[in-house]
Amino acid sequence: MDILKVTHLTKRFGDVRAVHDLSFAVQPGRIFGFLGGNGAGKTTTLRMVLDIIRPTEGQIEIAGCAPDKRDSAAIGFLPEERGLYDNMSAIDAIVYFGRLKGMDRHDARTHGMELLDRFDLADRARTKLSAMSKGMAQKVQLATALVNRPRLLLLDEPFSGLDPVNQGLLEREILNAAADGAAVLFSTHVMQHAERLCDTLLLLKKGEKRFEGTLGEARAMLPARIEAIAHDRIAALPGIRAAEAQDERGEVGPGGDGPWRRYMLELEPGVDAGDVLEACTAQGVPLRRFQERQASLHEVFVQLVGDAEIEK
């Protein structure tokens, strides 16, 4: 069963359409990347899922039921704008959020201490948040999202402001949550994290879905490309849509098989690298290098939404 199901969701603020006719679903144990630039509608959608704001049109189901603030026991949420009570200790903050989600105090404290130990903060459990570094406080906030062992984990731009070490920790926790059966949805405009983590990707632009599918399906939206060092004749082979020379012609080789040049080859739709390699062999085009180059997620989404909206 889908843990989260969104159907024809629309949200308008006056004349501004923040989300339009959006549908998707997230299953247990899956990591769903919710991608797009600033203002794409990601946070608005998450707020509707959390029942903070209500949709103008459409439906949201969490484990088969309409969202309700009283159902917070099933949800973990890490907001983009982080904030905890400075005068609380780390463990008291985690217990407080656990209690808000329906946990008894003992279970919240026990699991909270397990999380702090996992985050190398067990010795800071009684330290006030005001005395912690930003990185430490962010790990405490992550623990507040995980303490109730959520069935649905929502993370809004979770990597924002984290150093590389804490980004790695967060990636591990996302993978652990999915391995434990949670449905994980995280929003981001940084493609590298989505590329490493997600089972399914959805791209929003101005509130509308532009793509949904796997990383492989996203990459397949761009023509296949090959980096080759070869004789000039490679540019005329069948299946080559475009051949961009990367450098000047080289000298003729010892066997008279030059001149050499480095090429970036763009293939016709439906043509793969094996077809071109077979043509090189059949027509006697000599090669010094032949390497297929997969499109990055960044490159795919630049084609769909424009370079200005995606962080490199």
Image (cartoon, rainbow, N blue to C red):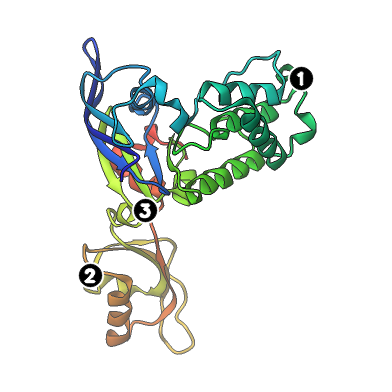
Name which residue lies at 69% across and 16% down: 88
Residue linked to disc 3: 215
Which callout, 3 or 1, points to the residue nearer the camera? Answer: 1
Residue 29 at x, y percent in the picture: 43, 49
How many residues crowd around disc 1 within 10 Å: few (fewer than 14), some, or many (20 or more)? few
Which callout, 3 or 2, points to the residue nearer the camera? Answer: 3
Q: Earlier in the sequence, mark 3 or mark 2?
A: 3
Distance Cα–Cα, label 2 vs label 1: 63 Å
Q: Where, by quadrant of the figure, is residue 65 drawn?
A: top left
Give SS at disc 1.
helix
Residue 233 appears in the rendering: no
Q: Which mark is residue 239?
A: 2
Residue type at mark 2: give it: Gly
How many residues crowd around disc 3 within 10 Å: few (fewer than 14), some, or many (20 or more)? some
Residue linked to disc 1: 131
Residue type at mark 3: give it: Leu
- Outermost residue on the bottom side: it is 255
